[in-house]
Image (cartoon, coloured by chain):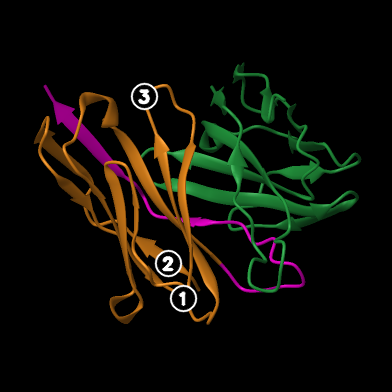
Chain colours: A green, B orange
Amino acid sequence: NAGVTQTPKFRVLKTGQSMTLLCAQDMNHEYMYWYRQDPGMGLRLIHYSVGEGTTAKGEVPDGYNVSRLKKQNFLLGLESAAPSQTSVYFCASSAPGTSNYEYTDTQYFGPGTRLTVL
Amino acid sequence: AQKVTQAQTEISVVEKEDVTLDCVYETRDTTYYLFWYKQPPSGELVFLIRRNSFDEQNEISGRYSWNFQKSTSSFNFTITASQVVDSAVYFCALSGGYSGGGADGLTFGKGTHLIIQP
């Protein structure tokens, strides 16, 4: 049971290049999330998905696209990378709560991807 | 809008001292969840605790304890007899807003960097 994994761990891009970050989870979780972490800013939500084939915008979605074609995978794409997208990206997953009083389960995070855009 | 404030940017104590990390939150939701995560120097995010808004009981887990006070919108974290291995960045986070299953992302504070000196 690997939990949440992210590929790649490190990447350096030039401005204008594109790339896709892959997140995979083997816990059969319905919900998946992408966050970015910048120095002194904490983590901020980029996009999230409540199930296969559905995605929604978070706090800082501009410049990113996502897809959830399979339940276990959540992809984050940068179509034209900018230096402002230099950050550490974390993926997380969680399951729906088990009762009316437990509607949000704990989010478990991947190890992160450190992206530098030159 | 939700907000989490961790006013202490950095705390430095000597090993074996007790230390309290403050967390103050803002939300309009009547039902919400509060979390603490630990980010050691290796960079991963480690889940520590989740607290429901309708459960104000304090919790103790070994050297860790949490004090949830709805009246002051605070969810403080205390480490007793601190150890060098406790050195990390600690994040307080908030989840709320039941939206058909509660898949909301977390709102994070900016984190408190805790340094335990030997």
Position in image of residue B22 (x %, y %): 25, 57
Q: Do dots 3 and 1 share one subunit?
A: yes
User: Who is closer to the viewer here, A110 or A48?
Assistant: A110
In this view, the mark in front (3 or 2): 3
- Secondary-structure class at tag 3: loop
Looking at the image, is mark 3 or mark 2 earlier in the sequence? 2
Q: Which mark is residue B27?
A: 1
Q: Which residue is drawn at 52% across and 32% down?
A: A88
Q: Do the residues labelled 1 and 2 touch (CB within 8 Å)?
A: yes
Q: Do dots 3 and 2 share one subunit?
A: yes
Which image quarter holds the C terminus of chain A? top right
- Secondary-structure class at tag 1: loop
Distance of mark 3 from mark 1, alpha carbons?
Answer: 31 Å
Position in image of residue A82 (x %, y %): 59, 34
User: Who is closer to the viewer here, A46 or B76?
Assistant: B76
User: Of the residues shown, which amino acid type is indicated by label 2?
Assistant: Lys
Position in image of residue B83 (x %, y %): 20, 29
Looking at the image, is mark 3 or mark 1 earlier in the sequence? 1
Q: Quadrant of residue B72?
A: bottom left
Position in image of residue A33 (x %, y %): 67, 47
In the rendered image, which residue does mark 2 sit on?
Answer: B3
Q: Which mark is residue B41?
A: 3
Magenta stretch: helix, strand or loop mostly: loop
Distance of mark 1 from mark 2, alpha carbons?
Answer: 7 Å
Q: In the figure, is residue A42 to the left or right of A71?
A: left
- In the displayed structure, B30 sits above or below B83; it is below
- Chain on which label 2 sits: B
Range of magenta residues: B96-118
Q: In the figure, is residue B104 to the left or right of A118?
A: right
